[in-house]
Amino acid sequence: MTFSDTTGSGYTVAQGSGGTLFLDNGAGTATVSVLSGTHTISSPVTLNSATDIASNGGTLLLNTTLTGSGALIVSGSGMLTLPGADTLSSSGGVTVSQGTLAAPLGIPHAGGGVTLASGATLVAAGQINRAVSGQGTLTATGDLLSAVRVNSASSIRAARRALAGR
Amino acid sequence: MTDVRTLAGTPNSAGIINGTVVLATSGEGLAGESPINVSVNYSVPVFSGSAVWNGSTGSSWGTAANWNDQLTPSINAAPGTFAGFSDAMTLNDSSSNRTITLDGTSPPSIV
């Protein structure tokens, strides 16, 4: 699934009268590639397989709820924002392999852990109810309800912290 | 006289597949008359599995005419609506903001 628009316009995938967008590549990885422009997905989205959202120059707004059991992979040099507390409601793990994953209202839904690759960043202002690990950087100002083991350069100002690592 | 025949088979490539089948008569006509062979041309559009949006704003995902096959633009097909197949889709340059509505269509396999 590729979003690309250099004209200054953008696309919105909306639900309309009903329906769900299923991202499913079987045992493979589905890919949402954002090359340019600002685009929005507001229809319900179910991750049936691992899904890689790659932001490389464009912006994708996920004004929706991600459900399903597929893993979420965040790649590309840009930023992917989870705008709502319920945006990430899928149960699979999350890997930020590159760029930044922003969660201004946190990740309160329990599920697979968040892995931050070296150079990747998770910025969260709300509660995080998933384990966070890896060589990347965590900037958190909300409650951390699960184990955290991340780069020592991380900035963690949590009211509650389950476990702080290195 | 008119009749309907079914042409069955599995295409092994995408695009417009053109061909000809020959319908032969037998046991008909006058005594001593040779069988009459009739050539019938067919043209089958085969979707590549990769579609590009061409619809205007507010149009439905499931309307085939809103999509062009990425390889053969003259073929219209809505990606993700064919059971058992995983399709790709591209939303690229448009002159204005576009909203695509699912409107009851639940694409099962978008990759």
Image (tube, rainbow, N blue to C red):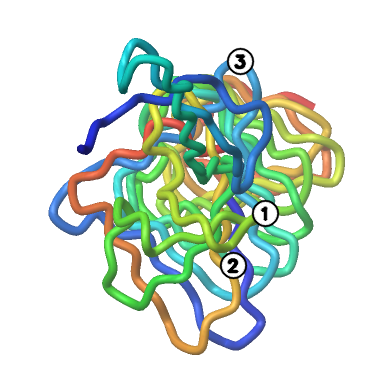
| Position of residue A6 in the picture relative to residue A25 (left or right) | right
Question: Circle 2 sits on which residue?
Answer: A59
Q: Is residue A142 above or below residue B59?
A: above
Same subunit: marks 2 and 3: yes
Residue type at mark 2: give it.
Answer: Thr
Badge 2 local density, few (<14 within 10 Å), some, or many (20+)?
A: many
- Which residue corresponds to the image point at 60% horizontal and 39% vertical from the top-left? B19
Task: Please tell me which of labels 2 and 3 falls first in the chain.
Answer: 3
- Marks 3/1: CA distance? 25 Å
Element under disc 3: loop
- Which residue corresponds to the image point at 53% horizontal and 24% vertical from the top-left? A49
* Residue B90 position in % (x across, y down): 58, 58
Q: Chain of mark 2?
A: A
Badge 1 local density, few (<14 within 10 Å), some, or many (20+)?
A: some
Closer to the camera in the image, B39 or A8: B39
Residue type at mark 1: give it.
Answer: Leu
Q: Is residue A9 above or below residue A64?
A: below
